Image (cartoon, helix red, strand yellow):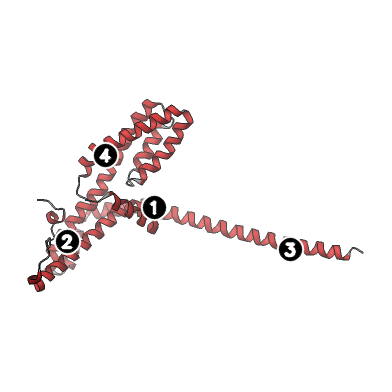
């Protein structure tokens, strides 16, 4: 008499077991994919952090030899331009990386005693994080500001107000006096350009693109300006009677618009 009920119960059990097996299978697959993605990001970041300084060290050790060897591969007619190009790249990229590290370290040193005097929790950690993240222009400072504000709010509202005031006063002093002295104005990059570069390179290369996006952009900019000025010279040579292009010389001084 209970045959129909037993069949329905058996069907329900079979359906439930199928759903459970599919859920477990999907859960394990998603977990494996997530773990693989996290492992890939961490391994790529560690590889860049560990191997980058090693490669840079050996390149700096033999930079003159590397330059001479590279120059031999360039056709003689382009060697003067190649020398100027290397000077510009060295000034732009090398100056940016060294300057950015220096101004980031100075910013962390400026924040540390201020946070200590405020009595905010984790003052040393906050100053260290602010200094490290400021290597990434604009975005890094905001990323360090948010957790600091949350920690200040946990103490009191007045502590949060003091934190905001101290943060922006230090940022103002750092931007007005430290950055111009250390970095100079040789990069000649508009803030909007910097933000767009960070957004695009971050989307393309992740954290590596955010950190090295500006140096990559400086390199691409130098190549583009060199090629366009070569084109303008060629145009002036053949069609100059119709009007000539200006700013066709490619040298470190001309590139940086120095008089």
Between disc 3 and disc 2, whose residue precedes? 3
Q: Which residue is mark 2?
A: 68
Where is residue 217? Give x, y as percent: 28, 57
Q: CA distance from mark 4 to mark 2?
A: 39 Å
Task: Indicate the quadrant where residue 179 lies.
Answer: top left
- State how far apart marks 3 and 2 are (Cα): 73 Å
Q: Is residue 19 left or right of residue 172?
A: right
Seen at 33% across and 43% down, the residue is 134
Question: Regarding mark 2 in the picture, which secondary structure is present there?
Answer: helix
**Can you tell which of label 4 and label 1 is closer to the viewer?**
4
Residue with the mark numbered 3:
15
Crowdedness of circle 3 by 10 Å Cα count: few (<14), some, many (20+)?
Answer: few
Residue at the spot of label 1? 207
State which tag comes first along the sequence, 4 or 1. 4
Residue lying at the far bottom in this picture: please name it.
238
Q: Nearer the viewer, mark 3 or mark 1?
A: 3
Q: Comparing marks 3 and 2, which lies closer to the viewer?
A: 3
Instruction: State the SS at label 1.
Output: helix
In whole angstroms, how far apart are the C-alphas of marks 4 and 1?
24 Å
Q: CA distance from mark 1 to mark 2?
A: 33 Å
Q: Which of marks 3 and 4 precedes in the sequence?
A: 3
Mark 3 and mark 1 residues within 8 Å of each other at the beta carbon: no
Q: Are marks 4 and 1 in contact (CB under 8 Å)?
A: no
Please rate how many residues cluster around mark 2, counting C-alpha atoms within 10 Å: few if below 14, some from 14 to 19, many from 20. Answer: few
Question: For the residue carrying disc 4, how many other residues have a C-alpha within 10 Å: few (<14), some (14-19), or many (20+)?
Answer: some
- Where residue 89 sits in the image (x, y, percent)? 21, 56
Query: Which one is closest to the eye, mark 4 or mark 3?
Result: 4
Query: Where residue 229 sits: x, y (%)?
Result: 16, 64
């Amino acid at each position: 008499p209970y045959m129909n009920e037993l069949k329905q119960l058996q069907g329900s059990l079979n359906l439930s077991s199928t759903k459970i097996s599919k859920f477990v299978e999907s859960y394990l697959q998603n977990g494996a994919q997530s773990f693989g993605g996290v492992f890939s990001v961490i391994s790529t970041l560690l590889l860049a952090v560990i191997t980058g300084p090693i490669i840079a060290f050996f390149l700096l050790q033999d930079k003159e030899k590397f330059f001479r060897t590279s120059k031999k591969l360039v056709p003689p007619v382009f060697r003067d331009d190649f020398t100027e190009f290397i000077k510009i790249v060295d000034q732009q990229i090398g100056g940016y990386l060294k300057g950015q590290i220096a101004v980031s370290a100075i910013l962390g040193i400026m924040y540390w005693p201020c946070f200590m005097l405020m009595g905010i929790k984790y003052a040393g950690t906050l100053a260290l994080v602010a200094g490290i993240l400021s290597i990434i222009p604009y975005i890094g400072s905001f990323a360090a500001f948010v957790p600091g504000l949350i920690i200040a709010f946990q103490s009191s509202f007045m502590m949060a107000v003091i934190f905001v005031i101290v943060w922006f006063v230090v940022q103002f002093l750092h931007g007005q006096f430290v950055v111009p002295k250390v970095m100079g104005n040789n990069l000649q990059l508009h803030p909007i350009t910097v933000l767009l570069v960070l957004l695009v390179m971050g989307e393309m290369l992740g954290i590596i693109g955010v950190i090295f996006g500006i140096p990559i952009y400086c390199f691409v900019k130098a190549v583009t300006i060199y090629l366009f000025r070569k084109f303008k010279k060629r145009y002036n040579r053949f069609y100059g009677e119709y009007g000539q292009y200006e700013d066709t010389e490619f040298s470190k001084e001309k590139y940086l618009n120095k008089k």
